[in-house]
Image (tube, rainbow, N blue to C red):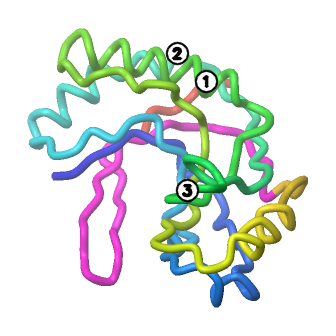
Amino acid sequence: MRAFISINIPNPISVNFEGFKNHVKFKAVDAQNIHLTFKFLGEITPKDAEEISNALNFIENERKFKISLKEVSAFPNEKYVRVLCIGVAEGNRKICELQKKIDDALFSKFKFFPEKDFVPHLTIARVKYVHDKAALKAFIEKYNDFEFLKFTAEKVSLMQSELRTEGPIYSEIKAFLLKD
């Protein structure tokens, strides 16, 4: 099974791609599938999932924290765009600290290599080709100071990703509840 570790957002995020979709070839992520990924694990077995869950139990000692999702950006940059994403304003440092702890727990036991230059974000679209860079820039500027959602992170999830032709189906393998 394909798996990843994430914070799943409590409400779907909607982004208006009108006026943009004629200038950029892209595939938007389904609103219910938008999440904040700590680590993509790739293919693992059910036994691996159980052992990984045990290694991640420390997460339940972490406290709940506020997250604010704000502004759209292009990755890796506006000149060569592969992904459009929403950034994390409030909660960024806590997410980075937790991600580092997850990396440490998984590297020591399972040899999952640590993420390099981890930046908390939520992918909203995968870009194939930009026909009009000015339209892309205008789209990004439209959401420059826009807050999409503010919520309290209450859990971290070990997720399964089942790839289908109509898009991936995500299901929770295990939830790690954060403390009050």
Mark 3 crowd level (few <14, some 14–19, many ≥20, 10 Å Cα)? few
The residue under label 1 is: 179
Image location (x, y in percent) of residue 90: 79, 34
Residue 73 - label: none
Label 3, secondary structure: give it: loop
Residue 36, relative to residue 113: is it above or below?
Answer: below
Residue 152, relative to residue 11: is it above or below?
Answer: above
Q: Nearer the viewer, mark 3 or mark 2?
A: 3
Mark 2 crowd level (few <14, some 14–19, many ≥20, 10 Å Cα)? few
Three-letter amino acid code at the position of disc 1: Lys
Mark 1 or mark 3, which is nearer the start of the sequence? 3
Residue under the point 16% across and 52% down: 1
The residue under label 3 is: 80
Residue 61 - label: 2
**Stretch of the chain drawn in magenta:** 148-174
Image location (x, y in percent) of residue 152: 72, 40
Mark 1 crowd level (few <14, some 14–19, many ≥20, 10 Å Cα)? few
The answer to whether the residue labelled 3 contacts the one labelled 1, judged by CB atoms less than 8 Å apart, is no
